Image (spheres, grey):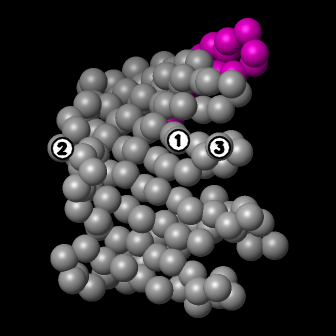
Amino acid sequence: MPQVQFYSYYDFEGNRTWLSDSQGGSVWYAWNNQRLQSMVMYTENNKSAQVGFGYDSVGRLASLTRTTNWDIATTINTGYTLDLLDRVTSITHSKGMSEDASTLSGFTYDSELYRARWHYGSGRLPSHNELQRIMNEVYSLYPLP
């Protein structure tokens, strides 16, 4: 088994700005007011993935933007809506960078926050794997007590 060494660099506020490994992979981080704004991941063969983070006015995660190899045609946007108790009330996934980007999927809760209603773009029904992926995303961001 090959040994891998990791190297990390930090800014003056203690935020990691770069992580690399001895196999040629690296991740660059950009911060603003102690909030992660973006990450760019590179592999040893110069493939890349970019992730952008957006926050609402009180600092809660409100959006993610994911792109592959700097190609905006691969962009997937995810928007989160939270209630006053910081509970996710809706998630929407869309493809594209414009205001008329097509909705891929999403869900909303009813007023009692325990019955979810799913939404899918183009009248397409989701696969079990898509449902599981979305639920895993919700639970990873906001675990149940």
Q: Residue at label 2? A: 73
Camera-near label (3 vs 1) is 3
- Residues in magenta? 1-16
Magenta segment, prevailing SS (helix, strand or loop): loop
Q: Tell me if residue 91 comes above or below residue 63 in the rendering.
A: below
Q: CA distance from mark 3 to mark 1?
A: 10 Å
Q: Quadrant of residue 42?
A: top left
**Callout 3–callout 1 Cβ contact below 8 Å:** no
Mark 3 burial class by Cα count in 10 Å: few <14, some 14-19, many 20+: few
Q: Give residue 54's mark.
A: 1
- Closer to viewer: mark 2 or mark 1: 1
Q: Residue at x 36, y 79 (%)?
A: 119
Q: Residue at x 31, y 40 (%)?
A: 67
Q: Quadrant of the C terminus?
A: bottom right
Toward the top, the furthest residue is: 12
Circle 2: residue type: Ala
Secondary structure found at label 3? loop
Where residue 29 appears, x then y in whole percent? Answer: 54, 24
Helix, strand or loop at label 2? It is: strand
- Above or below residue 71? Residue 56 is below
Q: Quadrant of residue 57?
A: top right
Up/down of 134 relative to 102, above or below: below
The residue nearer to you, when weighing 6 against 26, is 26
Residue 132 in sight = no
Task: Name the residue carrying label 3.
Answer: 57
Residue 12 as seen in the image, left or right of residue 53: right
Q: Are marks 2 and 1 in contact (CB under 8 Å)?
A: no
Residue 38 included in the magenta stretch of the image:
no
Residue at the farthest right position: 145
**How far across and down, in percent of the image, does residue 30 sit?**
54, 23
